[in-house]
Amino acid sequence: MTRTTSAVLGLLVCPAPGAAQDFDNIQIQTIRVTESIYMLQGSGGNIGVSIGDDGTFIVDDQFAPLTDKIVAAIAELTDHPVDFVVNSHWHYDHTDGNENFGRAGAIIVAQDNSRRRMETEQIISLNGRVQPPYAEVGLPKITFLESMRFSYNDNVVDVIHTGPGHTDGDAQVYFRDSNVIHTGDMFVRYGLPYIDQGNGGSTDGMIDALWTIAGLIDDDTIIIPGHGQLSTRTDLLEFRTMLVTIRDRIKDGIARGLSVDQVIASNPARGYAEPAGSAGWVRTAYEAYR
Ligand SMILES: [Zn+2]
């Protein structure tokens, strides 16, 4: 197993078949972003929390066994229970808490393609993990195609689908008044991003989406990435430059008639990732562009 792949598998939390992840040892860390917005980290994708007079809404809800701990962490911030959960996309490490939150009365919101995928069994292309369909109570009741807007907790919050990228159902959640954006896995802080090309994701789409996001925000924006620490627009643009550079090297190799093994041997991720760690990523991209 390559280094990058194992790192991504670690982040997606894919235990060996039969092994259960030990959620008992996971602690929820609360990171203040602004007076009304927080980031929670436990296991799985970063959770965004909006608190205020209107109530509470969160972006993503991690794994079902963590719901009680997540609820307890939110209760430290506000007396209001969670009214809405916005799913940044449909991957289990961001949405497996949906059924618990739905049962507790929260309305789940997502891009429409994400709802469609959560209705049926999905196989994650990276690791072959089967994601079972969610019960009705865990499915998004409100969906959107291109964008929607919340006016909530003194923020205009735009929820925007930027086309195929990490998956085919990604949503960016931009708190305009606070100048904070939750990018889901369109932007992450571990090396090469996982792009779910087996389920509608696209490298070109991610590159385009990152450009769209960069145009939406400014140098003062605080970014809550899908995974990793709070970031800036500069970090996001550097991440995009990495993708453009590696993609262009791969496409150049294809244009010169190189085989996939020759392209891998040319180390197109040089400067960004070790050859052993990037081979699988390069192979997937090669197949997509050839
Ligand atoms: Zn994901």
Image: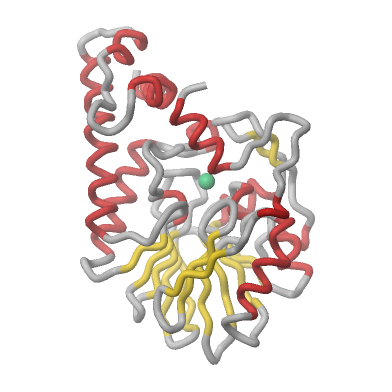
x 69%, y 30%: residue: 16
x 45%, y 27%: residue: 3
Using the image as rendered, state which of residue 272 and residue 285 is in the foreground: 272
x 38%, y 25%: residue: 278
Image quadrant where residue 265 sits: top left
In this picture, is 42 found above or below 2? below
In this picture, is 1 found above or below 40? above
Using the image as rendered, state which of residue 245 and residue 43 is in the foreground: 43
- Residue 284, percent from left and from top: 43, 24
Side of 115 relative to 287 (left or right): right
Q: Residue furthest front?
A: 25
Scheme of colours in the image: secondary structure
- Residue 67, percent from left and from top: 70, 63
Image quadrant where residue 103 sits: bottom right
Q: Residue furthest bottom?
A: 53
Using the image as rendered, state which of residue 37 and residue 214 is in the foreground: 37
Q: Quadrant of the C terminus?
A: top left
Side of 199 relative to 267 (left or right): right
Side of 122 relative to 168 (left or right): right
x 41%, y 62%: residue: 224
In this picture, is 252 found above or below 17? above
Side of 282 relative to 88 (left or right): left
- Residue 268, percent from left and from top: 26, 23
